[in-house]
Image (cartoon, rainbow, N blue to C red):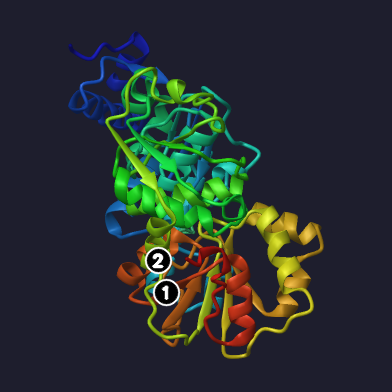
Amino acid sequence: MTLQLTERDRAMLRGDEGAAKKMAMSIIIRMAEISKAEKLLDIVGAHIDSTVYIGDAGLEFAEKLASLGAKVAVPTTLNVSGIDEHHWQEWAVASEWANPAHRQMIAYRSMGTIQTWTCAPYQAPTKPAFGDQIAWGESNAIVFANSVIGARTERYPDLFDICCAITGRAPAMGLHLSKNRAGKILFRLVDISEELQKSDDFYPVLGNLIGKLALDKIPVIDGMTIRPTDDQFKAFGAGAASSGGVAMFHVVGVTPEAPTLEDAFHGNEPAQITDVTMDMLRESRQALNHSNSSKLDMVAVGCPHLSLVEYKKLASLVKGKSKHPDVQFLITSNRAMTQLAQEAGILSLLKDFGVKITVDTCSLTSPMLPPEIKKMMTNSAKHSYYSPGLLGRDVAFGSLEDCVNSAVAGHIVQDERLWKE
Ligand code: F3S
């Protein structure tokens, strides 16, 4: 089956709508042909991961598009940058890095995008609705959009996402199509207490486990007896999209395309059934702990970016406590949530405790950590998964409460009560 193009697609390809759309459409068509898509479809929004500065190639691509007059055709949010635009000098970022990273920000800003600079666009007012066709980059955002919202996006790579945004078109393939959104393998929660299901650290641990076992297949989770919060789903999806390539999941009776087990599998039989036990979860939690000592230099929370609800929870945990002077406490979030936290009157409380906040970026995408930071602690499966390789740092994993208690104690503290045999 050859790719069917509309007259408008052909016009963009000819350059009738400008050189930027011509370049973007030629890339989309090549990708559609490789993927054996039969046609392109309209999208109603995009989220651009190409904003992350990783070297000259991404910068050159962005500046080339900008120089051709590129403008996005649909509402388009931006993922993190390589720097906190207005505060990067407060960190260990070298100007040789900051300058090109900032040029990349300027290039994407010039295209008429929405200046979200966040990896959690699904917590912004511009988030998509059920059934919306979108083109999103950033693995944790993709899995949340598909699974929790029920919007439809493929796992778009950097550079391709902006091509979709400029043309408003994407190949009709993969998770854009109903037939490809069926669950493939079943995970049954066995004897997992409701108390543990309610706790925040359950979700990154479960996500890390499911990602490793599901890889890029769509997992269906059955047996959850509570409805997780958006932040818990965020932590789960980020974990599953890091240890595996999960772009969509279903939770039976909870997520919008899985009211029943049969719906989750579109009436098919699961290719594989796995019982998730406490032993498996304990092993997954242990795998997120890369640190073999209780020493601690920095606690890092906000991966994916901290929401207002999480800001409030953190404020309630630090109230009346003092941070140990030898431990730094880093929050990564975005401008919008930090502004809301400011308006809610909780930033001063957090700053009195001694937190430092960075926006627009994070410690995994910006070389911002000073060399004396060697031992870290996080409540994020994604942060824990990538830190040894990307940062070369030992990381311990714990709940948000563990992170606060550790920052107060000056060494790693982990509450084992919910995880005991
Ligand atoms: Fe976001 Fe950085 Fe984590 S981009 S998901 S805070 S690795």
Q: Position of residue 107 (x, y in %)?
A: 44, 49
Mark 2 and mark 1 in contact? Answer it, CB < 8 Å: yes
Q: Closest to the observer: 83 or 306?
A: 306
Ligand 1 closer than 8 Å to label 1 CB: no
> From mark 2 to mark 1, how far is it between C-alphas?
8 Å
Instruction: Using a 10 Å C-alpha cutoff, classify the residue at mark 2 as few (fewer than 14 neighbours), some (14 to 19) or many (20 or more).
Output: many
Residue type at mark 1: give it. Val
* x 64%, y 53%: residue: 307
Q: Closest to the observer: 19 or 280?
A: 280
Q: Position of residue 52 (x, y in %)?
A: 40, 55
- Residue occupying the far bottom of the picture: 326
Number of marks drawn:
2
Instruction: Using a 10 Å C-alpha cutoff, classify the residue at mark 1 as few (fewer than 14 neighbours), some (14 to 19) or many (20 or more).
Output: many
Q: Is residue 92 above or below residue 313?
A: below
Q: Is residue 411 above or below residue 57?
A: below
Task: Give the label, 2 or 1, closer to the camera.
Answer: 2
Q: Closest to the observer: 169 or 350?
A: 350
- 133 vs 29, left or right, is right
Residue type at mark 2: give it. Leu
The residue that label 1 is drawn on is 395
Marking on residue 183: none
Point out the tag, 2 or 1, that comes first from the N-terminus: 2
Q: Is residue 246 above or below residue 89?
A: above
Q: Is residue 196 above or below residue 28?
A: below
- 357 vs 29, left or right, is right
* x 57%, y 69%: residue: 417
